[in-house]
Amino acid sequence: MNQFVIKGGTPLSGSVDIGGAKNAALGLVAAAIMTDDDVILDNLPDVNDINVMLDAIEGIGARVERIDRHAVRINGSTIGAYSVDYDYIKKIRASYYLLGALLGKYKKAEVALPGGCAIGARPIDLHLKGFRALGAMVDTKYGLVSAEAERLTGGHIYMDKVSVGATINILMTAALAEGKTIIENAAKEPHVVDVANFLNSMGANIRGAGTDVIRIVGVDRLHGTEYSVIPDQIEAGTFMCAAAATHGDITVKNIIPKHMEAISAKLLEVGCRIAEYDDAIRVKASGCEFSHTQVTTLPYPGFPTDMQPQMTVVLGLASGTSTVTESIFENRFKYVDELRRMGGQVQVESNIAIITGVECYTGARVSAPDLRAGAALVVAGLAAPEGITIVDDIHYILRGYETFDAKLRGLGADIRMAESERDIRKFVLQVS
Ligand code: UD1
């Protein structure tokens, strides 16, 4: 099992290129099988979650050809099975997107029921409600969700809760249903818009993605396309927080600044200086004093829940008492005990973290409880001038960050990926 080993205290400086958005790419890879023509996807992040999704579509018969590290050619004409097994779903919940894609194209699909996960219960009732509204018979039995329809017909769907996954799944199925579908209270996240744009580039008729009412007029078939994945809002935000926490000065490049507004606004409030360019943002925190603030996670354009742990790490270094309210997932503060071991002063009451700022963190051996919390602990380690931080269970982090340690080294950080306790000892000796 690999670890990240970090000697913190160096302010990050320089620039970093942000890759394609993992969460958008998960939807795009699933949607790519909805045509029998070739689909070329570019700017695909080379991270474990995407590689599992590519394996999952290969597993049901699609052809997947790597063009280079970030581009792939997918052909769904050879699909022979409509059932996605538990092996994939247990590795990535988002393989439930294959339910929407297969149901839309073949009118039947079967996917293992995703279980709870580290950050909360995560039901899929809204996805199923949407499929039923489009005329599918949906059954959950023996740990499987199966959905089947003789005809899919457009429907009017009101989402009781804003759900990214349900919005994407329903719009995929509705793209090939007969007639008009309206999704109300739809999620507005950038990756919802990306999946809609992608389907439109394949001949779908989807309007309103990015607002809370999406209108879809079903088409008979979708055709091939070439498409480039949008930049990763959360990877970019993580580097912005790393710059802040280390009092550094970095430029995150190849991003859409509009997607970063909630994060930029909070870093500005804390005391960082932010400069926006066409496709880059500079975060300057050198010489800045941080002051406390309040953050509440909300669906887009609110502050993203996937940035909550990284922001908490920054606020842990701000004077006074800050609060972070988690309103999306009930179990997203599991990293707080680990942060306390690094000197953070954070109390959790219900869904609110109450943070009393400290001067600095200190290095400690900690364990990543999930993907974003793991990245946040790395950020805390980079901001710890004394001691060495060892982050265990980094397989979570590798699910969503491509060459995280190399990109951080490019910004001057002292971080290594260790493959053994011997590697860790070697690194400690080198930096002591
Ligand atoms: C996606 C992201 C995840 C991010 C989350 C919120 C992907 C692959 N993952 O997850 O990184 O943290 O959006 O921005 O894109 N809910 C229900 N019933 C449902 C579906 C959801 O009650 O059928 C609830 C969830 O428990 C949660 C809320 O709705 O409280 C939002 O979840 P949702 O937006 O669906 O998250 P995901 O799509 O799973």
Image: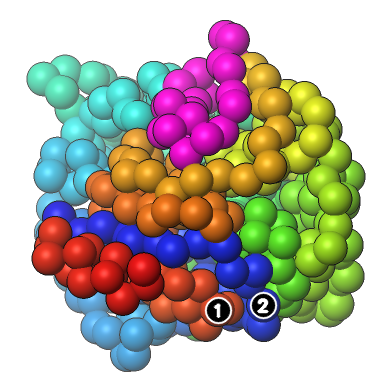
Tell me residue 144's x, y (percent).
Answer: 18, 27
Tell me residue 194's x, y (percent).
Answer: 61, 61
Helix, strand or loop at label 2? It is strand
Residue 174 left/right relative to 136: right
Residue 155 left/right relative to 138: right
Q: Is label 2 in contact with label 1 (beta carbons under 8 Å)?
A: yes
Q: Which residues are magenta?
A: 329-351
Most foreground residue, 2 or 172? 2
Q: Picture quarter containing residue 75? A: bottom left
Tell me residue 227's x, y (percent).
Answer: 53, 78
Most foreground residue, 52 or 165? 52
What amino acid type is highlighted by mark number 1? Gly
Tell me residue 100's x, y (percent).
Answer: 39, 43
3D distance between C-alphas at marks 2 and 1: 6 Å
Most foreground residue, 265 or 141? 265
Label 1 within 8 A of ligand 1 by Cβ: no
Q: Which residue is mark 2?
A: 13
In which quadrant is the C terminus drawn? bottom left
Residue 145 left/right relative to 398: left
Q: Residues within 10 Å of mark 1 (few under 14, many from 20)?
A: some
Residue 272 left/right relative to 390: right
Please give the label number shown on residue 412: 1
Q: Is 302 rendered above or below residue 428?
A: above
Helix, strand or loop at label 1? It is loop
Give the tally of numbered discs: 2
183 within the magenta span: no
In which quadrant is the N terminus drawn? bottom left
Q: Residues within 10 Å of mark 2 (few under 14, many from 20)?
A: many
Q: Is 19 rendered above or below residue 200?
A: below
Q: Residue furthest bottom?
A: 67
In primary-sequence order, the first of circles 2 and 1 is: 2
